[in-house]
Image (cartoon, helix red, strand yellow):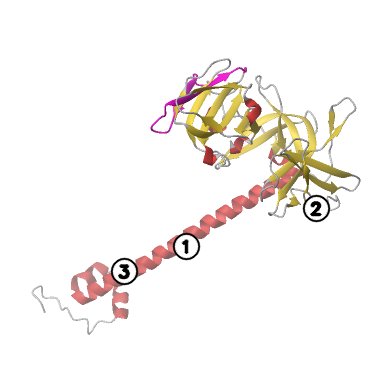
Amino acid sequence: MQGGGYPTSLSAVDTAHIDLSMSRSDFSAWIDTARTAALERALEMVKEKTEDLLLKQAALQAALERREREDKERKEREDKEEASQLVWKTNDIASMVWDFEGTRSWWPGTIHGRVSIVRVKVVDETQMVEMQDCTTGEDYIGPSRQQIVQTPGQELGTFTHKVSFETASNKFTLSRTSGKDKLEAGEILEWELAFPEDDGSTTAMVVPGLPLSYSFKLDSKRVEIATQIEGARLRPKEAWHRTPDPQEFPESSAIVLMEPSGMSSIAFQNMHSRSIFVKICRLEAANEDRPEAVAKVFCRPFELSPKAQLAEGKYHVRVAAGHEWRGETYLFGPAGMYLRGSEAQVVQFKTDHTISYPAGSEGLEAVDQRRW
């Protein structure tokens, strides 16, 4: 024995006895009488069990989160598939669903028209493309895969990319002209099927087996034009479906989010009745979804924005325009216009640049609101 009167040797106490003692109801009393070596071994056993339980807890938590995620994705797929089977007619009342980062909102409105869309995806660098979102079964849409037919465009330095496909009763050839001699793997090409009329107008076509795009006008006094959305985003309107509340658009301002600010500047002259919200981003982020801004510019209709002080260099510009502002998450809603710069915006050293909108919008191309 040592000074405290407790035996330190573990020779007479085995692990099984310690484990049994720790499970007894009078565990506190056992602690008071146990050998020092037994207490040390008991503590080691508790730590081992705790580590094992923590590992099992983490594995169980991960499994549950995976199951929840898989269940959510499955339900979303089923929901979209069910919604895509609904056939909407002109003047039908519906709601558009908008999902963003786990938040779902509903935007009620009216169907104004419909048209079939053709979507192909570039599979690899060989310029093989694959038809996307076609239904299977009796409606024949083919071929499912084909090589893009590429020819020089009418303008120097442009190229025309063509695809052809057949339905049960028709054959279509669609083309797209760009400045790229080759399309990148993963790139999506999309067309609306419209039949040209003698007067220069077009008539929308509905082809069984192809996804439908609907012309949809929101329930709002300020919406002038309808937006095009796919049927998978439409649902029957419910009493509780409502849009996020409109907010007052900020005063015309420029907010620089990078430090230090430079000796050059960009200002925007808004020559339209819509307000505009501009994001100025790093050029390297041009192909990103929802790129972070180095500067933000708010500009009310028919006003000149304050200057955003920037360092010289090349930037990527995105413009959102609309009548009803709903904050930086929802922006101007589905009825807004969302554009991205197709070319770099060059900011020269010690130079003040002024960009007019919409006069300067020839270098902008449409982008989905959720990717803006």
The answer to which of marks 1 and 3 sits earlier in the sequence is 3
Q: Quadrant of the C terminus?
A: top right
Q: Secondary structure at mark 2?
A: loop
Q: Which dot, 1 or 3, sits closer to the camera?
A: 1
Q: Residue under label 1, please give it.
A: 59
Amino acid found under the numbered disc labelled 3: Val
State the image quarter where residue 218 is shown: top right
How many numbered marks does the figure carry? 3
The answer to which of marks 3 and 2 sits earlier in the sequence is 3
Q: Which dot, 3 or 2, sits closer to the camera?
A: 2
| Residue at mark 3 to residue at mark 2: CA–CA distance | 59 Å
Residue 156 appears at what percent x and percent y? 73, 37
Q: Quadrant of the N terminus?
A: bottom left
143 displayed left or right of 29: right
Residue bounds of the magenta highlight: 250-273
Comparing 180 with 163, the one in front is 180
The answer to which of marks 1 and 2 sits earlier in the sequence is 1
Please tell me which residue is depicted at 66% across the width and 33% down the height of the picture.
Answer: 366
Q: Residue under label 2, please give it.
A: 136
Q: Residues within 10 Å of mark 3 (few under 14, many from 20)?
A: few
Residue 275: say if magenta: no
